[in-house]
Amino acid sequence: MQKYSINNQTIQTLLTWVQSGDIAIPEIQRPFVWDSSKVRDFIDSLHQGYPVGYVISWTNPDVRLKDGSKSRGKKILIDGQQRITALTAALLGHYVLDKNYKKTKIKIAFNPILEKFEVLNPAISKDKTWIPDISEVINSSNQWDLTQKYLSDNPGNDGNHISSIFSRLMSISTKQIGVIELSHDLDIETVTEIFIRINQKGVKLSNADFVMSKIASDEEHQGNKMGSVIAFSGSVVSDNQFTNHIVDNDKEFD
């Protein structure tokens, strides 16, 4: 028996689900592990109309989420966290929580003349041929003003061409991504197994990720709390300043 169905959703719909809280991230998921260049390439693929893979969701009222609450019938994001997070960072301007559990902002710049994306850097921020942050364009309701300002800053360019490029950039939100919806009657062990198998591709799960996924799915022993404690402890230990403090003040530390 097939355990899923497939539907296409626009990026705008997915982002609306995120903003309204209709999409939830379960404890078996990981922090954002993509680097900025991968976010840039992902946005470029959308702009070019290339396929970008599927997002997998599951609706179940009793799954524990990252904040410790229950899902209460929300769409639980089983696979696609990196893509959804990349979209909220690049198109909505949201902060992301990196693999060290630190907040960071990823700004993707765009050059309408070259029709090229790049991660914002100091050189690009000083170059008027670049739009420093595409989220400002994507969320604008006035394409005319954007085009006129750009042409004012970059005289000599074909206004009709630049306007069409802005229109194409703003249409990213209308592009579609396939959403695989897992059957609601699947149990957490089956869904965790699906998650682990899928993640053998892309940014692979390490042995530690595998263990954390299994710990998080163990609701009987409050796996979500154990997972959070382990993750926080790991991030603290990885902080060189904290480790040096221990070494300097605890003579028995080796």
Image (tube, rainbow, N blue to C red):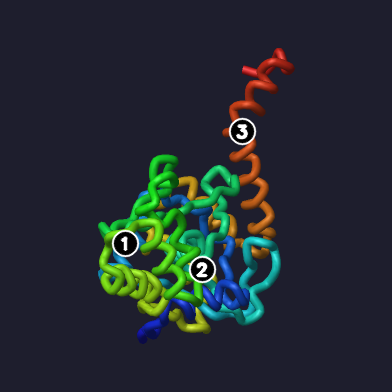
* Residue lying at the far right of the rendered structure: 249
Q: Which mark is residue 175?
A: none
Q: Are marks 1 and 3 in contact (CB under 8 Å)?
A: no
Q: Which residue is mark 1?
A: 112
Viewer-proximal residue, 180 or 254?
Answer: 180
Residue at (39% x, 41% y) in the render: 123
Q: Please state which amino acid type lies under the numbered disc 3.
A: Val
Measured Cα–Cα span from mark 1 to mark 3: 44 Å
Looking at numbered disc 1 in the image, what kind of residue is underneath it? Pro
Cα distance in 3D space between marks 2 and 3: 30 Å
Disc 2 marks which residue?
A: 189
* Position of residue 126 measured from the top left corner of the image (x, y, whole percent): 43, 44
Q: Which amino acid lies under the numbered mark 2 shown in the image of this protein? A: Glu
Crowding at dot 2, Cα within 10 Å, few <14 / some 14-19 / many 20+, comes out as few
Q: Which residue: 64% across, 26% down?
A: 241
Q: Nearer the viewer, mark 2 or mark 3?
A: 3
Give the mark toward the camera: 1 or 3: 1
* Residue at (26, 71) in percent of width and height: 161
- Callout 2 secondary element: helix
The answer to which of marks 1 and 3 sits earlier in the sequence is 1
x, y (%) of residue 68?
Answer: 69, 63
Q: Which residue is mark 3?
A: 237
Left/right of residue 220 with respect to residue 88 in the rendered view = right
In three-dimensional space, the C-alpha distance between marks 2 and 1, rounded to whole angstroms, equals 48 Å
User: Can you see residue 245?
Assistant: yes
In the image, taking residue 5 as reference, residue 247 lies left or right, namely: right
